[in-house]
Structure formats: C-alpha cells, structure tokens
Amino acid sequence: MEAEAQRWISAFISAQAAELDAARNTQLAYARDLTDFAEFLDRKSSTIAQADRAMIEAYLVDCEAQGLAKSTRARRLSAIKQLYRFAFEEGYRGENPALQIKGPGRSKALPKTLSPEEVERLLTAAPETGRGNDRLRNACLMQLLYATGMRVSELVSLPIQAARGDPRMLLVRGKGGKERMVPLSPPARTALAAWLAALDAAQEEAKQARGIAPSRQLFPSPSKEGHLTRHRFYALIKEIAVVAGVAPSKVTPHRLRHAFATHLLAGGADLRSIQVLLGHADISTTEIYTHVLEERLKELVLEHHPLARE
C-alpha cells in the first residue's frame, strides 16, 4: 500500500476516534477494510487519491466475486464512503466519488440463539469446567453474560471495583466509552460474590508470598491487556458446551447475548428496554428481535381470541 493511502487511512481513523469516540474494535475494522481497498487499487495501478466511482464499483464487484457476504460488502462500502466524505470535507479531494454508490444492503437474517434449556445446561456445566478457582470464575462469567447480555469485550474487561459491595446493578462501559447500568439476577450475584471472594484470597496470597500487587481486573490474566481475552473466552465457552452436552458449534458469546434478548422479549419485556440493556445506540439495531414479539402475539391471539377457540 502506497504511503499516501496510509496517511489518508490513518488520518481518517484518528478523526473517527477523536470526533466520534469510535471504539477500538471499530477502528481496527475500518483499518482492515480500507487497507483491502487500497491494496486492490494498487493492483489496478490506482490510488485512493485517484480512484473514481467506476473503480470503487469495480472493487465491490471483485468483493462479490470472492464470495463475500452481503453484510461484509455493505460494511466495506460504508468504510469507503466515510473515508471519501472525510477526504472531501478536509479538502484532500475536490469531489466525493463514492457519494452516489448504493451498496448491496444487509441481510435480514434472524439472529441465531439458544433455547432456555440449552442455556440452563451451559450454566450448570460452567462450575464443573476447569480446576480449582477456575470453576468459580467460569460460573461467574457465564452467569454475568446471560444475566446482562453484555458484549464479550465488556464482560472480560470489567474492573474489580464494579463487583464490590454486592451490587444489584453493574456499571458497564460499552462501545465508544458509553456507560450503562445493567441489573444482576440473584444467581449472577451469588456467582459474582463467590468468585470475588476466591480472587481476593488468591491475590492476597500472591502478594504475601511473592509481592505481586493485586490486579484491578475482575477477570485477571497475564495477557497484554491484563484481563481474560475475548479469544480465550471464546475457547472457554466451547469447553463448557462440551461438558454441557450442547453442540459447540451452536455456542458463542454473541449467541448468548442473543439468547438474553430473545428470552426477555418472549417473557414480556418491551423492545425499548432491551435496547437500553444491550447498549444499542439505535432502536433499529434491536428490531432484529421483533420476530419474537410476532410469535408471542400470534400465541396471544390463538389463546385468547374467542374466534380462535374450537
């Protein structure tokens, strides 16, 4: 990738971080997508500064030829559009070549989830997976994830102070640094208290024996981040699935987040409340769960409407 393209992409991502408070994962996604676009232009003897509408559309055709999903192509076009809007506003280019390009749209596939019975088996298996204190940690992780619907990045990076004082609610820092409060179920509070007691004891022992300062993380790890990584938790949840007798291919952290939302809606919660709990900035993101409401309304009509009775 040529140097000018690198400067454009770097400046754009820095602006996103500063002005829109874009999350770290969002910045990385922009960098990957725009780097792929710049490398395509290199192969076509063009650059980000020179590319016209036809060249951008040729890139989208190439993405489709590679078999990339609609959602991936839509995301890449979104990144390109935002880059060129930024370049136009900053005076890097006199026109925006991506302005009138329409994308493939996003698939409306329903989110895959887990049944309440499958979740119950996972919660039962968590304290049986691992050794020693890891079992308490695993029970706490799974209970918190299902009780709150947190994103996995929000869960693994929780500070230990968030757990002090037997809280009824947790303060969660989400995308873009936005904070929200999420309530804890009684089983989640019990699992949290048990893990915190074990963690405090282990860290006090390490301090006395080896002079190691206690971690500020609720789920500490020797990783670069200082806490359990998303990748490690992804592998861990697969191990729990095996113990639970649930197909590991069905179990991911994000699918448990979907289960949280789906089961709440099926139980009578409203969509606006789910939006707040999940930390969605826009209600349209939460509307993927409306199929649950539709099914519940059908059941209500069939059960209570006089003409539906035989």
Image: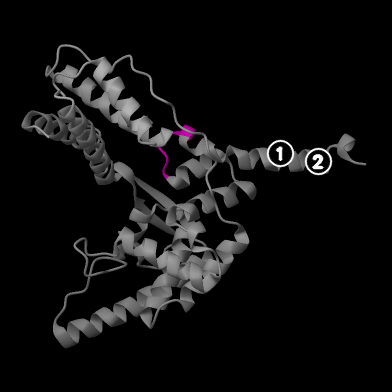
In magenta segment, residue 280: yes
Give the farthest residue toward the left: 3
Q: Give the quadrant of residue 229.
A: bottom left
Mark 1–mark 2 Cα distance, whole angstroms, equals 9 Å
Nearer-N-terminus badge (1/2): 1
Residue 95 on image: x %, y % = 19, 12
Give the farthest residue toward the top: 94
Residue 86 on image: x %, y % = 20, 23
Which residue corresponds to the image point at 23% horizontal and 20% vertical from the top-left? 85
- Residue 133 drawn above or below residue 144: below
Name the residue tied to disc 2.
302
Visible in this render: residue 192? no
* Dot 1: element: helix
On-image quarter of the N terminus: top left
Residue 159 on image: x %, y % = 29, 62
Q: Residues within 10 Å of mark 2 (few under 14, many from 20)?
A: few
Which residue corresponds to the image point at 11% horizontal and 19% vertical from the top-left? 92
Residue 173 on image: x %, y % = 32, 50
- Residue 309 drawn above or below residue 64: below
Q: Is residue 112 left or right of residue 308?
A: left
Name the residue tied to disc 1.
297
On-image quarter of the C terminus: top right
Which residue corresponds to the image point at 18% horizontal and 25% vertical from the top-left? 44
Q: Give the quadrant of residue 13.
A: top left
Which stretch did the figure color magenta?
279-284
Q: Amino acid at mark 1?
A: Leu
Q: Amino acid at mark 2?
A: Leu
- Residue 59 drawn above or below residue 307: above
